[in-house]
Image (spheres, rainbow, N blue to C red):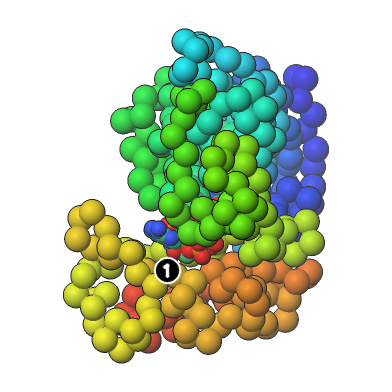
Amino acid sequence: MSAKVESQVSLKPYNSFGIDAEALHFAQARSDDDVRQLLAYAASEDLPVLVIGGGSNLLLTRDVTALVLRMNSSGIRVLSDDGERVVVEAEAGEPWHPFVQWTLEHGLAGLENLSLIPGTVGAAPMQNIGAYGVEIKDVFAGLTALDRQTGDLHEFSLEECEFAYRDSHFKRNPGRWIILRVRFALSRVGALHLDYGPVRQRLADQGITQPTARDVSEAICSIRAEKLPDPATLGNAGSFFKNPVVSAELAQCIRDQHPGVVAYPQADGRVKLAAGWLIEQAGWKGYRDGDAGVHRMQALVLVNYGQATGEQVHELAQKIQGDVLERFGVELEMEPNLY
Ligand code: FAD
Ligand code: NAP
């Protein structure tokens, strides 16, 4: 077997929360063959398998009594190019943001609003990553996944992925599929999405009136760098809760008591509330208990100041959920994957 299996490995460098949980066994897969061999090894040892990428959407609440298989495959290729529409395929282990930069350097638009999201290409379909009004479903052109039940490869179409807000077929069927490579339909003449949050204003502040996709990417990188803690210096997994989508009646009831509520009407008549606003109103912004806390600039982000355990972060998350439910009647759903 070409991949090396190590034992009793700290996962601290492999999760952006910086939680010091231990993997019973750990190995990195650089190819499809590595993945198959590691799955066969795990089966022969009767070990469960936990697949990870960059560990930026994980909360490890205990040691992992499994083989942790980290996707580390690499490769980016153009599959087709008709002069306007270009289909690009990337291996699962490719880090996401450098991949976005590669597309921009090749004059391809489509992923610029998803700049600076941590993690890997292979994990991006898991929760249909999204930011600044774009989700990967908007540029998705297919993916190849290994079915762990049968050992067969399956080519997924857009419909089969069942993408939704921070959700997908893969998230709803955890452990079944290993995503090996993902395809994106990008554009040399793409329309840019500037109407979300402060993007247009940031470009205007820089005197840019006819932005390119690269300009949009740079504007979003600068906004994100100001608002979000860098996991390299403060452990976190980005937004800890999804924005809740509630009935129009509940949204109105909250608005009656809190006229400043941040709310976005949805096409189906329901209303998306900004979870960060609810948590901040409940007084949690900047809260700290030991080394687990709520970021002082962004209430949606839970942080590890150094030695917090995953359990402590989870307990804090549960307290916030209970408080928000009691105050506003709104259930907050956690976004990271708990182990
Ligand atoms: P991991 O955390 O390693 O894994 C996540 C899940 O996917 C796990 O369940 C794992 O088992 C599974 N998985 C991983 N790779 C594979 C694979 N190849 N095949 C099958 N299953 C797999 N998310 C957004 O949507 N939008 C944002 O704007 C955003 N901003 C963030 C900002 C910060 C500072 C941080 C820390 C996180 C942010 N996130 C955001 C969350 C996170 O970056 C994304 O969800 C990212 O796609 C996770 O990738 P990963 O490789 O780190 O996945
Ligand atoms: P923000 O711009 O301060 O906005 C707060 C919330 O309001 C966001 O969560 C966003 O929902 C919603 N929102 C803002 N403008 C909207 C519009 N025009 N239409 C509908 N909804 C709107 O948010 P932020 O925290 O700085 O994040 C900026 C973007 O990056 C958001 O898209 C956010 O989802 C994404 N992000 C995600 C993570 C993560 O870990 N998942 C981490 C950081 C940033 P949406 O979240 O639905 O877009």
Looking at the image, can residue 278 be seen?
yes
Residue 157 in the image, given as x and y percentages of width and height? 37, 24
Instruction: Name the residue: 75% across, 64% down.
Output: 234
Using residue 173 as the reference point, say whether residue 223 is left or right of it.
right
Residue bearing the label numbered 1: 274
Instruction: Name the residue: 20% across, 55% down.
Output: 268
Query: Between 292 and 268, which is closer to the camera in this rendering?
Result: 268
* Image quarter hosting the C terminus: bottom right
Give the amino acid type for the residue marked by disc 1 in the picture: Ala
- Number of numbered discs on residues: 1
* Image quarter hosting the N terminus: top right
Instruction: Name the residue: 42% across, 80% down.
Output: 324
Query: Between 93 and 70, which is closer to the camera in this rendering?
Result: 93
Q: Is mark 1 within 8 Å of ligand 2?
A: yes
Query: Between 318 and 21, which is closer to the camera in this rendering?
Result: 318
Using residue 131 as the reference point, say whether residue 48 is left or right of it.
right
Say if 248 sits above or below 6 in the image: below
Q: Residues within 10 Å of mark 1 (few under 14, many from 20)?
A: some
Q: Secondary structure at mark 1?
A: loop
Residue 84 in the image, given as x and y percentages of width and height? 47, 17
Say if 241 sits above or below 221 in the image: below
Say if 13 sits above or below 154 in the image: below
Say if 19 sits above or below 252 in the image: above
Looking at the image, can residue 118 be seen?
no
Residue 2 in the image, given as x and y percentages of width and height? 77, 20
